[in-house]
Amino acid sequence: MDILNALVAFANFVLVPGLTYGSQLALGALGVSLIFAVLRFSNFAHGDTMAFGTVMAILFTWALQSWGISAGPLPTALIALPFAIIATSLMVLGTDRVVFRFYRRAKAKPIILMIASIGVMFVMNGLVRMILGTREVQFADGERFLLPPAAFRAATGLAEPLGIRTTQAVSVVVAVICVAALFWFLNRTRTGKSMRAFSDNEDLALLSGINPDRVVMVTWIIAGALATIAGTLYGLDKNYRVFVYFGMLLPIFASAIVGGLGSPLGAIIGGFVIAFSEILVTNAWSKILGYLAPEGWLGDGLYQALSTDYKVAVSFVILIIVLLVKPNGIMGSK
Amino acid sequence: MRNTLLFAGVALLFVLTGFFQSWNLALNILNLALISAVMAIGVNIQWGWAGLFSAGIVGFVALGGLAVVLVSGKSVAGAWEAGTPGIIGALVFGAIAIALAVWMQKKLPKGSTRTLATIAFLLICFFIYRALLDPAVMAVEANDSSKAGHIGGLGLNSLWAWPVGALLAGAVAWVIGKVALGLREDYLAIATLGIGEIIVAVMRNEDWLDRGVKNLIDLPRPWPVPYELELQRSPDFTDWIGMVNADPVSSSAIAVKLLYAGLFTIVLLALLWLCERALNSPWGRMTRAIRDNEISAAAMGKNVKYRHLQIFIIGSAVVGLAGAMMTSLDGQLTPSSYAPLRFTFLIWVMVIVGGSGNNKGAILGGILIGWLYLAVEFLGPQMMSFLTAGLPEGALKSQLAESAAHMRLFTLGVILLLVLRFAPRGLIPEK
């Protein structure tokens, strides 16, 4: 029995990665959820909007680096983020103007808007591939570790190291800031309140003189910003590849639906539920159990419920269970 | 009249490809386009007839490919002795366990005890299942692992795999439909998106089944299609070639592709005939009634849920058939090539461009978009080099040339958006 080492191993392999991935998913799910609440369709292009935002962040990062600007120990991409957000917001506003506005005005069925979002997804994916191709881009710079494993081991004298990468810490901190700012905006500002009113009851909101175009515009800007931030954080953490963002579509939708589509708080809870379940199920527990079980009990198995290649199955199963048991999600209304 | 013109226009595209590129390439594209048309029929059955949005088409295409491996793949010596029965046993055990869990859910009184009991039961069954499966899988994968390492196929003719692919896809669709149909339409889309990815993930990772990412090559061709070398050696063929005075190597390749095209056309026409019959029967009218207004159809006594399940299975089976045809044509299974953009969303573009709800429209869309998807590969760079001919050599020119290779997703997205906006009923609208 070596509880301390087991706890450190748990933190290293489950807690820290789970918090990081959960923050990234939560930001993505917030974007999907907002679009659903205000515009009332599931935006399949969100994954590729994240990819587009990340590509913009990469381009601005390269520009800043070539001018010799850096954020010291932090990744330069953090300075590039505001510019990337502006570029992505302009892009999504452009797609709204060219594509979605027509269907909104025609009061098309949500499924038609969803199919249109598939068209936008193709266009964005093609654009992103034209800009950076399909290669893998590593754009995290600055200090690699906030807490290097060796330093942790030297300080505590434990056998098990605990490392926290800068990108992991940045993900969590940025996500907390974004979520706080978003909640402040939705609950305290006039525009935020009008957005919530619009999502609760469109007709009533229109009668009280809320300008729908403005609500829609603000929603797209926020969704574009959230997508850029989520995508960039994920790209910093795991390197940028265009395919990955399409693959994130399912966990993101699962997070949003598990929490309750349209509920911002639900999206955050959903993000962490999905992230931790994925990691708990696909983690190899042999190391952590090794500290807890008496010697020689475990054998040489990995104690892994599912291989990491099946993590998509985890979010899917949770999604199905929630849809069957509580179709409106954890935080959803009746 | 308009339809004939449209089909003639598409045929002209292939003829032009043949003249300006090569006949070999034109036939390659034609074969893939015919298969895409079959997939488009499958999606059209689900979406056009019944309004079911499935985003997991790629999974059913992959299942069709799996059927080819299992039915017509070469048998692997020693695999059966090593552990195939163990694997089958474990799978049967898993299926029985899930069936029992479903039965428990139905029979036990409602409450948290029931939920806990089911979860505990499933957990125990999962560990037993892994204990049964893992050793058998290890044994099979260790058997001749450099060349085989999988359970092998039955070695039958590849044609048999086509109906088996349809059955396999239909069976999986039944399971999925039981769970996911009845969800709201956008939830159904997201759930099926997950299912498609899971099926492909299984095929990529379960080496015992199909060698996973190590790929499975040398799958035999379906019955009437010979190999090029055989054809070049056969006296009849050389006589015939001698008469028209053609090159034996390239003409044998073309003959093989023509045979494939003939087979696929037969399947396509048979499907079209069946679909037209079904759509104009009382059954077809009922499905459209359900699509247009579920509530009033239910009020007329139609079992909406059951009909949705039925149509979901039929559509998926057609897609599975197409998947099997494609793997038969390729002669190999590469699980990593099953990308959702190519096999789910591209098929959607075909159906919507062609005209959802109309069988001929789906076929036209399948062949047209199938041609475009592959033709952009050579047209894009050519156009780009034509457009940038005036530019000086340098980074900009090479960047533009490189980006042209990625043009096709962009082009298809633009086409989908244009059709959806300006001709939402497609090229051949539903009557």
Image (spheres, rainbow, N blue to C red):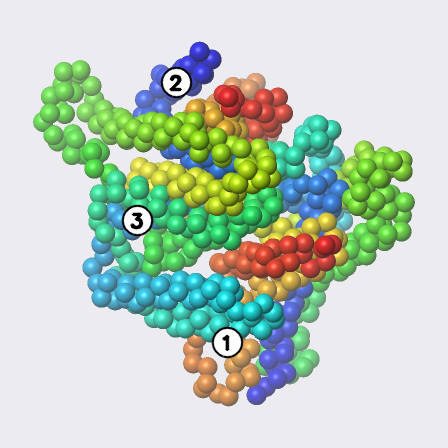
> In the rendered view, does B232 fall on the left or right side of A238?
left
Q: Chain of mark 2?
A: B
The three-letter code of the residue at mark 3 reads Val
- Residue B11 point in image, percent of width and height: 39, 18
In this view of the protein, can residue B43 be seen by the observer?
yes
Say which element carries label 1: helix
- Residue B203 point in image, percent of width and height: 40, 53
Residues marked 1 and 3, same chain? no
Q: Which residue was labeled with disc 2?
A: B11
Residue A179 drawn above or below residue B369: below
Q: Which residue was labeled with disc 3?
A: B69
> In the rendered view, does B105 fall on the left or right side of A329?
left
The three-letter code of the residue at mark 1 reads Ser
Q: Which of these two is toward me, A84 or B284?
A: B284
Say which element carries label 3: helix
Q: Which of these two is toward me, A89 or B32?
A: B32
Calculate the distance from the C-alpha at mark 2 to the C-alpha at mark 1.
Answer: 61 Å
Q: Nearer the viewer, mark 2 or mark 1?
A: 2
Q: Which residue was labeled with disc 1?
A: A286
